[in-house]
Image (cartoon, rainbow, N blue to C red):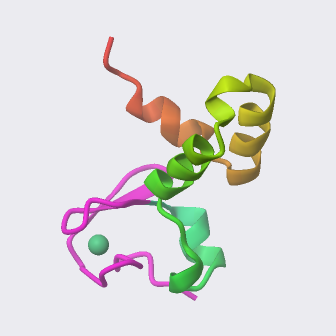
Amino acid sequence: MANKNLCPRCGSHDIVEYETTIECMKCHFEFKKENLADLDDEDILSVQEMKDILDELGLNQDSDKLTKMKEIFDIEDSFNQKKHKN
Ligand SMILES: [Zn+2]
């Protein structure tokens, strides 16, 4: 089981804890806390990597599938937190 006080990617202690995620200040990846609890380090995808997979699959053109995949990955909240541009 991963330690949520360590970055699962680079092992840095320099992390910032948010409500549902942590962000590593060293490699700047963001990880969902529930993934840290449930998965081994090597199995943990960062939020950015999950988003890249959705982009890669071209799901941005298919809102139904995109919504479904977001549910599977459970990353809707993380996306919304980042959307404070306007
Ligand atoms: Zn890191």
Q: Residue at x 52, y 64 (%)?
A: 33
Q: To which quarter of the image does residue 84 belong?
A: top left
* Front residue of 60 and 24: 60
* Front residue of 42 and 57: 57
Q: Quadrant of the C terminus?
A: top left
Q: To which quarter of the image does residue 57 belong?
A: top right
Residue 81: x, y in percent?
44, 33
Ligand 1, seen in the image, is in the quarter at bottom left
Q: Determine whether 32 is above or below 10 in the image.
A: above
Q: How many marks?
A: 0
Q: Is 5 inside the magenta-drawn segment? A: yes
Residue 37: x, y in percent?
59, 75
Magenta-drawn stretch, dominant element (helix, strand or loop): loop
Q: Determine whether 34 is above or below 40 in the image.
A: above
Q: Residue at x 59, y 68 (%)?
A: 35
Residue 77: x, y in percent?
57, 38
The residue furthest top is 86
Q: Is 62 inside the magenta-drawn segment? A: no
Left or right: 74, with 30 as reference point = right
Residue 54: x, y in percent?
61, 45
What range of the chain is rendered magenta? Answer: 1-30
Q: Residue at x 53, y 84 (%)?
A: 42
Q: Quadrant of the N terminus?
A: bottom right
